[in-house]
Amino acid sequence: MKQKLMIIGAGREQVPAIINARKLGYETVATDINEHAPGFAYADYSEVVSTADFDGNLSVARQYQVDGVMTLGSEVAVPVVAKIASILGLPGFSEETALKATNKNAMRSAFEAFYVPSPSSEPVKTLTDAESFASKHGYPVVIKPSNSSGQRGIEKVNDLDALCHCFAEAIKYSTDGYAIVETFYAGPEVNVTAAVVQGQVTILSLSDRITAASPHFGIAIEHVFPPAITDEQASAVKAASVLAIKAIGLENGIAYPQVVVGEKGPQVIEIAARIPGGFMREVGLYMSGIDMIDVAIKLAMGCSFLLDDYIAIEVVPALSVRFMTELDYPTINKPIAKIEGVDDAKKTQGILSVEINAEIGRLLPILNSSAARFGAIIAKGKDREEARKNSHLALAKIDIKFVDE
């Protein structure tokens, strides 16, 4: 009888895990609140349950007597996965690790205990708390929900007037009634992906995280490898990332630290204990040759293995992931009539993938979170300049026509 793997979430970003798990010989059980989730078409069994619904997912896990449970690209599912694994005695990390990886205040406390370099911060429950922190440390500050993802409710705040509005937004997206306020640390942002197997950390990729200009604070519009930092800075980023992984207690899993390299060296802004969304799986794959999805599946099933066993593809020297957003198309508040030039874009030199999720008849999403990115172009090159040139050339070939144009 085949072993069963439960995958919480069956959206577009979870589809590759469902497919890969079946290729590896496992039966798959997928859950998602969307009854039309694309992953259901690939799973052996599917149940309509929210990724955040612990009781519902536990019931599914018991019903199918699963041998492993995992998620990817879903922050809210991480604590659910950890709790199910703990209760059913399945492989996985602890609920404490899940908390430290998803609650930014708990995360910063863990960082402090392990001397992980990171911006000064405090948990805040009232506007007065936030004002007190800003008065003590000076503006600008950054305010965030304590436990949200996708850049929702995150803002850089330059003065008291803005703090009032941004605090309310941060609290709105938090589920525990707290926000976190931190000093703003200037510098280039670097995304890190790592595989952790039996406590051994292997860095898979470092890449620049290029973000949109204000008022779209913190939303990535491009990932680029190799990052535009020195070898010495890269070594320091890796060291800080390993320390952050140790701080949250992750012994087996995928880690996703986000680091800013500023005047005082690298500072870890946050870390996730899951395969990240936003095509970061592809960045790690093309940079290391290792598919972190296969690694996560084997870890969820309690397998012993060597990372070298999961070299999936040949690495490329440089990569650009260029996201498509409303900023690329000036027409707003008009439905999409047609999308042209996609085939030409795919024929551009160095293009590895073109994905577009915009729908005819609908408006382009407003760029207020990472979820509002509606497409991505992945391009390779002999160096970062060529990779970026290729992705940008491909983007220029895609023409979105709007109604009445």
Image (tube, rainbow, N blue to C red):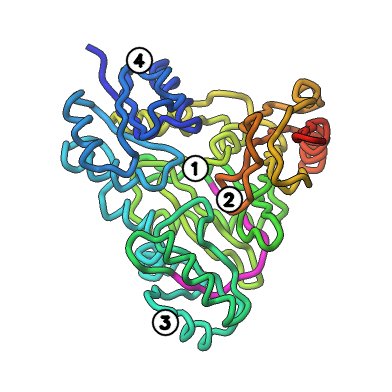
Using the image as rendered, state which of residue 356 and residue 200 is in the foreground. 356
Instruction: Give the label, 1 or 3, closer to the camera.
Output: 3
For the point 38% across and 54% down, the residue is: 101
Other-residue count near label 4 (Cα within 10 Å), few / some / many at <14 / 14–19 / ≥20: few
Main SS, magenta region, reads strand
Q: Is residue 170 above or below residue 42?
A: below
Q: Is residue 139 above or below residue 270?
A: below
For the point 52% across and 83% down, the residue is: 134
Instruction: Give the label, 2 or 1, closer to the camera.
Output: 1
State the image coordinates of residue 115 (x, y, percent, origin top left): 42, 69
Using the image as rendered, state which of residue 101 and residue 247 is in the foreground. 101
Quadrant position of residue 114: bottom left
Quadrant position of residue 243: bottom left
State the image coordinates of residue 287 (x, y, percent, origin top left): 62, 36
- Residue 185 belongs to the span the image colors magenta: yes
Q: Earlier in the sequence, mark 1 or mark 4?
A: 4
Q: Earlier in the sequence, mark 2 or mark 4?
A: 4
Residue of label 1:
276
Q: CA distance from mark 4 to mark 3?
A: 53 Å
The residue under label 1 is which amino acid type?
A: Pro
Q: CA distance from mark 3 to mark 2?
A: 30 Å
- Residue 36 seen in this snapshot: yes
State the image coordinates of residue 321 (x, y, percent, origin top left): 68, 39
Callout 2–callout 1 Cβ contact below 8 Å: yes
Instruction: Give the label, 4 or 3, closer to the camera.
Output: 3
Residue of label 2:
191
Task: Tell me if 371 is positioned left or right of 79 in this view.
Answer: right
Q: Which residues are magenta?
A: 180-192
Q: Which mark is residue 25?
A: 4
Task: Tell me if 49 is positioned left or right of 215 in this view.
Answer: left
